[in-house]
Amino acid sequence: MIETALHLLPSTLALGASYALVALGFVLVINAVGAVNFAHGELVMLGGVIAVGIASVLPDGLAAPGLIVLPGVLLASAAAGLGLAALAYLPLRRAPPVNIFISTIAVGLIIQHGVTAGVGPEPRLGPPLAPGLDQSTMVIMVAGVAIAAVHLLLSRSQFGRMLRAAAQDPDMARAIGVPVGLTIAASFALAGALAGTAGLLLSNQYFVTPSDGANLMLKAYIAVVIGGWGRIWGAAAGAVLIAVFETLIAVWLSYAVAEAALYLAVFAILAFRPQGLFGDTEGRRA
Amino acid sequence: MIAGLSFRQVSARLSGRDVLSDISLAAPAGQVTALLGANGAGKSTLLRSAMGFVPLRGGSVLLDATPLDRMPVEARVRAGISWCPEGRRLVPAMTVTENLAVACPGGAPARCRGLAEMFARFPGLAAKRADLAWQLSGGQQQMLALARAMISRPRVLLLDEPSLGLAPAVLDELSDQVRMIAAEGTAVLLSEAHPAWALACADHAAVLVRGQLVAEGTPAEIAGSKALSDGLLG
């Protein structure tokens, strides 16, 4: 039992790291526009499909096909994030957040069915990052670099400060000269890039299927609930926790029980610790 | 034309109610102009209208001789208008330094200079530079909000209810800071529901009652006026 768990540790952490990228992008958009992006899971799936597509035109026998497609996936997914903002957010930016829930669901469905119509509904295998090296280790490394880059951007750069100020209080941010439209667009682009990277990272061990989106979106949503609504690093930690929880229960009982237990755990968190598992309740308000 | 901020016959309606009616008022450069009145008299709305947050129904807001009416908020900030809002509205989870840096225009060297200048000016903040904004006392938070508004070197400072909830010792420090800002040539428009402190700090004062300007004069004239006592009763 414990041996099995230890054996699964690398792949569990790799899954957790990929979920963390999904959750990071998801929470960035929540903070930027105050609304949930229900198409986020589809952006992840789209990243996987783009990775499969670029990899299919690469010659065989490359040392690191997954790493070679990464820049293309990043760019295309960031563009997809911007496209999502232009379609689902921009026309409704003065409307109540519930409208954005619905418009993102609509765009998510368009992406899902567009991909199904374009390449078919069957699962596809994404490129391994570097076939000579352990895939799980490589996934953890790539995700780690991406998370560190986001952390540096948000905490150390003027642009990150602007992003955080605009997320906290958009009107006040405008009044101190923050280009709030630009920070929102950047949040969507960054969310898309992170989602696409996660899609690439997941595509080799878990395949890419056009209907994957909803499940991934739910995982991100749960990660944000666990981590505390709107807390960026809480969401990333929540994502890793979900992966560990899922794997442990799945090894012990079954995957179906693991999914059920996850949702039960979320109900329990919402009921008894609605501020999330991590950190304090103060500090959100001055 | 006067240098500074002027309102010319400004009117505004919000949710079917006249919140500003035909207001003409100047906040000249180098002076503190106090805007007094009860809560709900329209003081904050007038300040927000200069910032571009309130659509005008009539009239015009000018910086020197330039009408601001078609400018979005961001352009007004660049033109030199700065807003220190009621309730301060800092980013609670950012440090003192970060709250200041994010409001500083220009590249990294300009930010360094701006921060150094503000820390020299507000020594209390320099000692707390690595603290998160929500950890500061009310007085320190007000100083941080004021420093954030000044780091862009504005020509006009809109200062909304800065004295709210502050201890007398902090009020003295705040008056010194506001007087110094005006002495450097900035036009300060100071909105206050509590007149004694504001009048002591101001060069000129005006009283707002239900969206209308009912009196204007020197602090001494306004201090004893019936308009002020009536105005404060709403």
Image (cartoon, helix red, strand yellow):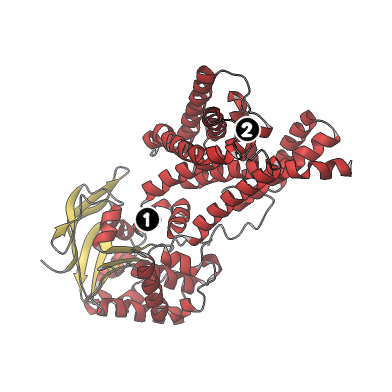
* Left or right side of A211 for B91: left
In this view, the residue farthest toward the left is B1
Mark 2 Cα shell of 10 Å, populated few (<14), some (14-19), many (≥20): many
**Residue B143's image quarter?**
bottom left
Report x, y in % for residue B45. Answer: 31, 56
Is residue B99 visible to us here?
A: yes
Secondary-structure class at tag 2 = helix
- At 71% across and 42% down in the image, what residue appears? A134
- At 48% across and 73% down in the image, what residue appears? B140
Q: Determine whether A258 is above or below B155 in the image.
A: above
Marking on residue A203 = 2
| Frontmost residue, B216 versus A41 | A41
**What's the amino acid at mark 2?**
Ser
Q: Name the quarter where the N terminus of chain B is drawn.
A: bottom left
Marking on residue A219 = none
Q: Name the quarter where the C terminus of chain B is drawn.
A: bottom left
Report x, y in % for residue B217. Answer: 19, 73
**What's the amino acid at mark 1?**
Val
